[in-house]
Structure formats: C-alpha cells, structure tokens
C-alpha cells in the first residue's frame, strides 16, 4: 500500500483516513487514479480535488452514509456506489453490531480492490455478467432465541459469488476458528484474497496452454473436491507438504493450492509496496543474506524471483519484530522452490490479464 499526501497541507495520510489530522480536510479515494485525495466542498454533496478545487466533481459512495466507505464516484456518473461497494449484494446492517462488522469487512474489501485496481484486473459486476460477475454476500449466522449460533454462515466462492461469514469480523470469532482449525494465519483480508483467487481461476485460466501449465503446477482441478477435503480433514496433509505447498490447506486440492498461492502473491506484493513507501531497508551487520531494499515497484515485478528476493529478508525482520512484541509471526510461512514457481505463474497471469 502506498502512502498518500494531503494536497492541502502536505501531511502524510493513509488509505483508510477520512480526515487529515493536521488541517481537517475531508479525504476521499478516487479509483480512477488509485489515490487518496484531499477535497474541497463544491456544493451540496459535491466535492472537488484539492488544492484548487477545479476540474471534475465527485460525490461519496452511498455507503459513506453508514460510515463504511471513503471512496468517491464521479458526480455525473451512473453509479451510486463506488468501484468496490457496487459488487455487494448482502451486507450486515440489521443492528449496530452488524454495522460495525460491515465497517471492518468493508476496509478489508477496499484493500483488496486497491490491488485489483493497481493491476487493472477484470472485475465485472453481475449487471455486466449475470452468470459469473463478481458479487459479495456478507452473511450472518443463524442464531437461536438466546443468541447462540445454530448454524454458522460459510465463507466460500461459487461462480463469481464470494460469501463471507460476517461474524469473522469479530476478533474472538475469527481467532477461535483459527485455533480450532490449527491455522497459522487467518484474517478478513486473507479471506478476500483467497476467495477471489477462485474467481480469477475461472476468469483467467481458460486457454489450453495456460490450463496445461496450471495443471502441471497445481494439479488437475477436476479432481473430486468433496473427497479431497474429506481426506484432508480425516488424514491431514501429506508428510512432505512443506516441500511443495504454501500451507496445509493448499495441499488439500489443486483449486485450493491456486487460491492460497494467489492470496500469498497479494500479501507479498502489497506488503513490499508498503515497505518501499516507508523506505524500509534490512541491513543487519554480519548477516548479508538478510540484506534487502525494495527499489522496484512490486506491482510491476518482472517475475516472482524478484519479489521473493526482497520478501524473505523483510518477512524475517517482520517476524522478529513481532516476537519482540510478544506477538505471533506476521508471516509464518516458508516458500519452497515449487511455490515460487507457482507464484511466478500467477505473476505472469496477472500482468498478461490486465485490462
């Protein structure tokens, strides 16, 4: 994620900020240039971009009324919702707790869309593609009269529909699931990045040559999915999974291997861009193998090797800092050569598929 600057006073501002902490300017994100802008009032409900306020006019996404979005839409455009929110179908706004969950979910969703915009990946809505367009349902659990969970909503993907269990916006729920499933990492943003990997497999892995290479790397996605998951939960991962996969879940089925690698590709690229924005350099004396500086745009990396070369020292440093704070590792994963090859395939797929 890039750092942004308030064009009114020069203060550094961040992706999820709505007001400049120095001058109080209203801030809004414009998908067209993937930038957070300081704004100038331009009439009832209308805003222009600072400093001068000239040029195009904007209004906030309708979800700003609920305090869940800081993105803008062109004032003369056809959409009431922003580039991210217009994909939503079911949102949890039935009560204050649901609204707070939606705020957290929305931030993670917009972070996902930041990456989609940076790569200019195709993201048709259901209006544009009724059969397979991208749409999100943020689902509530089924509760009894005492508020106990009778049936937990499921997170998953099917034909462009990404469902997310809204309760996982609560730290205690998400952490309890992570522990019960023996996962090293679980987050809302991770869910989004994983599930949209399934969407892009269907959108991008189509021609015969691409499909053949994907099956060589990840396996045949036509393998019985339900049987593979049963085997994974009953027997656990293969004994040598760490030599071939990014996670135990990735070893369960080729479709999950692709989605897991897709999510990690997003994790790595976006975190490297953040490191570059902050000018982070690792240069530990006596440990030359851990020296790294992100001198390139990770979103334009020519191959995964370039990404991994910078990522490994940075992730080691991040994990060490987390341990110094008594916190779990930020990135508790290892990247064996087969995984790097898979990441390279995804890097090429993303760049070749930009609209």
Image (cartoon, grey):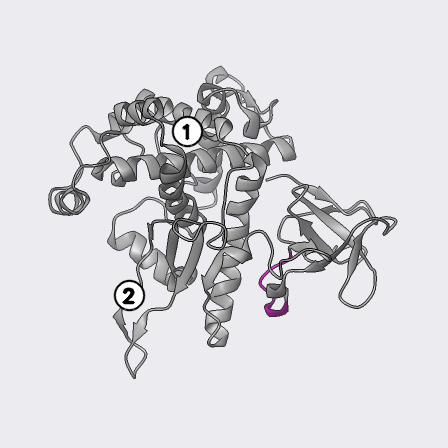
Distance between the alpha carbons at the discs numbered 2 and 1: 32 Å
Segment tinted magenta in the rendering: 65-70
In primary-sequence order, the first of circles 2 and 1 is 2
Residue at the image point whose x is 54% and y is 19% from the top: 285
Residue at the image point whose x is 45% and y is 68% from the top: 92
Question: Percent x, y for residue 104?
Answer: 50, 59
Q: Nearer the viewer, residue 206 or 262?
A: 206
SS state under label 1: helix
Q: Is residue 324 above or below residue 206?
A: below
Which class describes the residues within 10 Å of circle 2: few (<14), some (14-19), or many (20+)? Answer: some
Q: Nearer the viewer, residue 140 or 81?
A: 81
Tell me the residue that label 2 is attached to: 152
Residue 30 relative to residue 201: left or right: right
Q: Is residue 36 visible?
A: yes
User: In the rendered image, which quarter contains the N terminus?
Assistant: top right
Q: Which mark, residue 47?
A: none
User: In the rendered image, which quarter contains the C terminus?
Assistant: top right
Tell me the residue that label 1 is attached to: 346
Residue at the image point whose x is 50% and y is 40% from the top: 122
SS state under label 2: loop
Q: Main secondary structure of the magenta part?
A: loop
Q: Nearer the viewer, residue 119 or 124?
A: 124
């Amino acid at each position: 994620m890039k750092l942004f600057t308030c064009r009114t006073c020069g203060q550094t501002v961040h992706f999820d900020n709505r007001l400049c902490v120095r001058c109080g300017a209203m801030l809004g994100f414009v998908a067209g240039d993937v930038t957070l802008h300081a704004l100038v009032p331009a009439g009832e409900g209308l805003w222009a971009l600072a400093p001068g306020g000239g040029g195009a006019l904007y209004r906030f996404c309708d979800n700003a009324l609920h305090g869940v979005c800081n993105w803008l839409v062109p004032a003369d455009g056809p959409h009431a919702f922003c580039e991210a929110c217009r994909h939503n179908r079911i949102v949890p706004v039935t009560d204050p707790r649901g609204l707070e969950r939606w705020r957290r979910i929305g931030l993670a969703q917009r972070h996902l869309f930041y990456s989609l915009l940076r790569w200019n990946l195709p993201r048709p809505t259901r209006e544009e593609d009724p059969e397979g367009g991208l749409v999100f349902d943020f689902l509530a659990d089924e509760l009894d009269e005492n508020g106990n969970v009778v049936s937990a909503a499921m997170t998953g993907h099917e034909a462009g529909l990404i469902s997310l269990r809204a309760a996982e916006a609560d730290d205690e729920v998400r952490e309890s699931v992570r522990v019960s499933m023996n996962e090293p990492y679980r987050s809302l943003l991770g869910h989004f990045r994983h599930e949209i990997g399934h969407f892009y497999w269907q959108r991008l892995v189509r021609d015969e040559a691409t499909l053949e290479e994907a099956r060589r790397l990840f396996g045949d996605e036509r393998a019985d999915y339900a049987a593979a998951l049963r085997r994974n939960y009953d027997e656990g991962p293969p004994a040598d999974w760490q030599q071939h996969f990014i996670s135990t879940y990735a070893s369960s089925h080729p479709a999950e291997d692709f989605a897991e690698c897709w999510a990690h590709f997003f994790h790595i690229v976006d975190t490297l861009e953040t490191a570059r924005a902050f000018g982070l350099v690792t240069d530990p004396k006596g440990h030359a193998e851990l020296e790294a500086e992100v001198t390139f745009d990770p979103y334009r990396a020519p191959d995964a090797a370039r990404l991994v070369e910078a990522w490994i020292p940075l992730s080691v440093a991040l994990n060490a800092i987390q341990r110094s704070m008594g916190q779990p590792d930020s990135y508790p994963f290892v990247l064996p050569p087969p995984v790097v090859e898979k990441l390279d395939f995804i890097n090429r797929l993303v760049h070749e598929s930009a609209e």
